[in-house]
Structures are given as C-alpha cells and as structure tokens.
Image: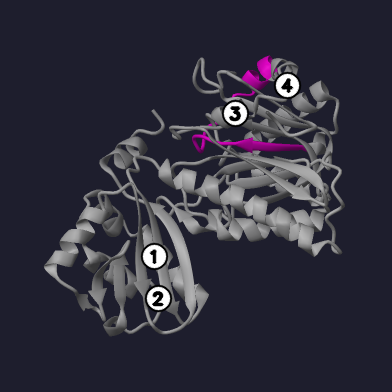
Amino acid sequence: MGVKGFLTSAIAAGIRYADRLDLGLIYSEKPAVTAGVFTTNQVKAAPVVLDIERLKQGHAQAILVNSGCANACTGKEGTAAAMRTSELLSETLGIPDEMIQLSSTGVIGEQLNVKAFEDNIRQLVENLGPDNFDDVAQAIMTTDTVPKVVCRTIEIGGKKVELMGMAKGAGMIMPNMATMLSFVITDAQIGFPELHTSLINSVQRTFNRITIDGDTSTNDMVLVMANGNADNPWIDEEAEENRQIFEDALESILKELALMIVSDGEGATKCITVRVCGAKEEEDAEQMARTIANSALVKTAFFGEDANWGRIIAAMGRSGVRFNPETVDMAFNDVVIVKNGVAVSKDAESRAGEVLKKKNFTVSIDLKEGSGCEEIYTSDFSVDYVKINADYRS
C-alpha cells in the first residue's frame, strides 16, 4: 500500500555490489511541496550541495537515491557525476532537472559509478509502481540489518491523510540536524512554510536526540514531499490547529524511525534512553545527556552489563554543565542506584545490573536544580561495532 499520487521503484544496479538493491526512486506524479533538512557537517557530499540549492524553490517531484557510494569528497568529478545522474532521470521521466533531489550513501572518497546509472535508469523508471516503498527502504541500506519503514493515517478536516516514512542509518550517527537518510511522502495539502516548520520541529525532537557513535555524516538529509492529493483543507498560516495535527503525525513517524536506527546501531545489543531532569535549563539537560550517551566508557559498560555509575557521573562532570554532585540522584529504570551523590547499596547495584541485561532501559538522572528535562537515545558499544567499522571499506 502506498500514498496516493506517489510511485516508487528499486533495482540492483551494481553500483558497488552485485545482486543487491542499491538504486531507488521516489516519484510524485505532480510537483510536490518539499521541505528538507541537511547535514551541518562542513564537508558536504555533492548531492547534498545540489539539493540545498534546488530546494530553495520549495518543490520537487523525484528523489533519486543510491547506496554503495557516498559521492562525498570527490571534487568536480563527483559534482559532474551527480549532475549526470540527475540529467539521466530528468530525460527519462520528462521532468525539469531542478525538480530532482539526489541522495547517496556509502563509502566516502570514491567516485560514483555513473555507468551503473546510465545502464539502469530506464529500467528503474519502467518499474515505478505504487507498492515498492519497502524495496526503496532496502535499497538505501548500508550496514543496516533491517529496512526501516513507518506509516500513519490521520484525519484533517474530515479527509484521510496518509504519511509513509523510511530511514537508513546504523553508524556515523549523531546529528546536529539529522544523521542518516530519511524520506517521508504524504498526500497532505500543506504550504511550504508550514511543512518546513513541522519538519524542523519534528527533527529537533527526534533525529536530533539520537547518537550511536558521536559522528555526523557528510550525506545526512531528511526530505518530506507533500503532493496534496488528500484534498484536505489547506494547511496554511490560518490553520494552526490542522498544522499541529500534521506535525504530531510527522513527529511520531520520525520518532519511531529514530528509535529503529538506535536499535539497529552497528553491533548494538541495547537501546538506552538517557534522561536528565532537574537541570537549570533544558539546554543544560540536553548537553549533559548527550555527553553521557556519547561516552565510550559508559557505552562499553552498558554492553558489559556493568552498573558502573561512576563512569556516568564522570561524564556528567566533563559535560560543561555546572551542577552540585552532592545532590544527584540516579536510577536504572526504577532501581535507584545513587542518592544525593553517593551509592545506595551493593544490593541496589546488583539489581541495577539486572536492568542492564534488558534490550531497552532508561538511565534517569535528577540534578534537583531546576525544571530542565531532556532525553537522548543511544546504544551500547560492542565488539561487533569495532569489527564492522574496522573493515567497512573492504
């Protein structure tokens, strides 16, 4: 099942590996209002640079995405390659070149296999259909172990509105925006300012709250296309209530995708919520939670199922947030392990160790200094994470 007015396709083009879906296409039968958020890394891949410029018009009609090669740090040749793939699709679909968004993921520093596009674009377009969304989600995978797809149906002004989203990401994950590829299609009728606002707000509360390894990629992007086929009342500056309904649905999709990314983190065995409350400001809570979530020592302790709270409070101490260590409470799920800055008991530490055996758990910290409260979602560091990233290019 798809979203009205959208067609999708994915094929094995041999961009890097044989017999593996690696080239995907999302196509709107008419121009769609499109908003995007892109990597904040100073090093941006060729398709990201092109997309940012093209999306200033607020509309797009197609997303062409490949795995196997990031087309990043590839100089003028990489830019020319990206533009060539766009031209091929433009000619085959019969749409303006600037209506195409490009996306690539894979190894940095290698030139894009343009011949694979030249040989397969026509077949990719001929395979367009309403039910291939899951195949595109598979085609964008790199070290992901499972495709990530989420759907929602909402009602706006008595009209049914559909949203479908996909994402890929398992490593090089810590956003200062988003940090993977994610594409959402919807038949909502919505203006660009409202779509862009909803996307920015939703990303901030979802993809901007996850971290696998503290790295921000060169290719990260989130794109949302809205073709208006639902014929709901226009969501514009005078329809704030309907915009909020839409934003809530979009945020719900992105939150679920974000947590799927954490659960599928490279070598991950656990999905952990780090919650810091009682901070003077929300920004302080986020900064402290992110420091804990990115700590290699904390993450390896999670993998080893060791309730080593000393590593956590040490990370708090170097987070740059000022607090009084003698008022800190800490709990793993509902097991309080630290009270007013000191260990509760050996029994509590033992019970906390049992919590760490779970696939999902929460580390809760109360600074008792204010009302600031934020959550960051992270995974553990396993032996497999090192193995995967030690020979990723081979």
The CA distance from mark 4 to mark 1 is 44 Å
Q: Nearer the viewer, mark 3 or mark 1?
A: 3
Report the residue at 36% width, 82% height from top: 323
Confirm or deny contact between disc 3 and disc 1 (CB under 8 A).
no
Say few, some or many: other residues with alpha carbon within 10 Å of mark 2 (under 14 / 14 to 19 / 20 or more).
Answer: few
Say the numbered circle drawn on residue 128: 4
Whether 93 is drawn above or below 267: the answer is: above
| Location of residue 100 in the rendering, given as x and y in whole percent from the top left corner | 76, 36
Whether 234 is drawn above or below 75: the answer is: below
In what element is the residue under mark 4?
loop
Q: Earlier in the sequence, mark 2 or mark 4?
A: 4
| Location of residue 345 in the rendering, given as x and y in whole percent from the top left corner | 14, 71
Specify the quadrant of the image occupied by residue 94.
Answer: top right
Report the residue at 47% width, 72% height from top: 373
What kind of colouring is applied to the model shown?
one colour
Specify the quadrant of the image occupied by residue 87.
Answer: top right
Say few, some or many: other residues with alpha carbon within 10 Å of mark 1 (under 14 / 14 to 19 / 20 or more).
Answer: many
Q: Nearer the viewer, mark 4 or mark 1?
A: 4
The CA distance from mark 2 to mark 4 is 51 Å
Confirm or deny contact between disc 2 and disc 1 (CB under 8 A).
yes
Say few, some or many: other residues with alpha carbon within 10 Å of mark 3 (under 14 / 14 to 19 / 20 or more).
Answer: some
Q: Earlier in the sequence, mark 3 or mark 1?
A: 3
Q: Which residue in the protein does label 2 denote?
A: 320
Q: Nearer the viewer, mark 2 or mark 4?
A: 4
Using the image as rendered, state which of residue 262 and residue 329 is in the foreground.
329
